[in-house]
Image (tube, coloured by chain):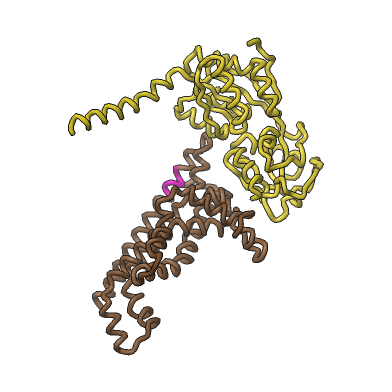
Chain colours: A brown, B yellow
Amino acid sequence: MLDLTTQDWTAIALSLRIAVVATLVTLPFGIAIALLLARKDFWGKSLVDALVHLPLVLPPVVTGYLLLIVLGRRAPVGAFLADHFGIVFSFRWTGAVISCGVMAFPLMVRAIRLSIEAIDRRLEDAAATLGANSAWRFATVTLPLALPGIIAGAMLAFARALGEFGATITFVSNIPGETQTISAAIYTLTQVPGGDAAALQLVVIAVVISLAALVASEWLARRATARLHGA
Amino acid sequence: MRTRLVAILVLLVTLAAAPSAAAQDGVTVFAAASLRNALDRVNAAFSRTTGIRVTASYAASSALAKQIVQGAPAEVYVSANLKWMDFLEQEKLLVPGSRIDLLGNTLVLIAPQTSGYDKVDIRQGFNIAMLAGDGRIAVSDTRSVPAGLYAKAALQSLGVWRAAEPKLAQAENVRATLAYVARGETPIGIVYFTDAKVEPKVKIIGTFPPGSHPPIIYPAAAVAGSRHPNVTRYLHFLQTPAARTIFERFGFRFLTPPKAS
């Protein structure tokens, strides 16, 4: 029934790997920035807010191109990283992780920020009066209360990273085994006469994976909320 | 207030209708990406001489063939290899008898202008892996794009495909391949001679022996369903000495016997 080549399976595995790594890598930054935007007021706050949301409104290809001129092999930051640390993003899956992470970041921050803002500050104040310092309060009160939002943010980011195409193909192009994700594989197949059957199969798989991710996130979020309010 | 709104709507509708009226008496050309600079000049010359507007869409010949099969409104198709023209012919999408072999080209090895590489002797078993180093070799998609198909054929016949294949960075058309090398993303790349000529940021470090790949031929033809008089004039113009001068200036070889203007 499913007649996929090894290259197709590689694309699927690569998409999942890149999406998972991108989500995990951006999660600490997402929580930190969400906390900052939700709790602190500082000069330049609206600028930070705008920068965080920039990948959401810029055309993905533009974001990819910006990454290219900053992190490309001959670009300022990219050349520095390559020469001093041996870190290269061009045509590597690590570059794909960066582009997917950047595109997914605003969605993650929004979801987490909303849930942090919804936390009853009095619970944290109560913990403070009982002697908890800010780090302890964050770990034992804020974080668990924000968990449904963090899970939602992470799943949104995962789904966005899984489907990311424009920025990735502009930044790290389309190398089978390294940067050819499901979207890029489908795109390549649609560019060739006769590739439609194979493209359709990949499309079905992409839909199944995305649905599975959505169902899983719903279930996780509901469990987290139940534990907060129930037990 | 109401009349103002109606006036604006009428204006918008007229504006929306206008461009499609103008497109009626033009020629729509789908051409291989490598033809961009040269064909733009030829099209401008054609418009100046005949007053007929030309709209050109440049992409990989394979992608264009796919679009034509799906019903894209192309009237003339110029491919970078015979394969995709044959494909359209089999699908009965060409005007019978309109097909001509127009241009020829050469396959070259390029490097960024700042590269330390100078002259590479491209022959049987040449060490392409060493030239790539820990970087990649920029080529066009070797499964469908003409420049990639020629490159793969050349690398195979020279006995270096096994060494080169894992190091390939495949782009979706030959100009994207050119851009990789121009930006210094890859240390070497394989494009047409005519592409290297228009990009000052790359230099040619070697030429592939013509016998190492199928002859590079650009066929041109009218797409079935095109408007007859304009298209015939256009295809005729492509074969005149005026067009020939332009194509040869960009480095193409002119294959058809030139027709009188």
Residue B169 % position (x, y): 63, 47
Which residue ends up furthest to the top in the rendered image? B260
Question: For the point 28% across and 74% down, which residue is it?
Answer: A227
Residue B54: tell me if it is visible.
yes
Would residue A95 be counted in the magenta stretch? no
Which residue ends up furthest to the left in the rendered image? B2
Left or right: A77 as drawn, with respect to B115: left
Residue B111 % position (x, y): 71, 45
Location of residue B31 with respect to A80 vertically, above or below: above
The quadrant of the picture occupied by the C terminus of chain B is: top right
Total numbered labels placed on residues in the image: 0
Question: For the point 60% across and 25% down, which residue is it?
Answer: B41
Location of residue B123 with respect to A173 vertically, above or below: above
B170 or A207, which is in the foreground? B170
Question: For the point 39% across and 20% down, which residue is it?
Answer: B21
Location of residue B219 with respect to A151 vertically, above or below: above
The quadrant of the picture occupied by the N terminus of chain B is: top left
Residue A181: tell me if it is visible.
no
- Range of the magenta residues? A200-204
Left or right: A87 as drawn, with respect to B91: right
B189 or B17, which is in the foreground? B17
How would you classify the magenta stretch by its main secondary structure?
A: helix
Residue B130 % position (x, y): 76, 52
Residue A228 % position (x, y): 28, 75
Left or right: A157 as drawn, with respect to B237: left
A169 or B11, which is in the foreground? B11
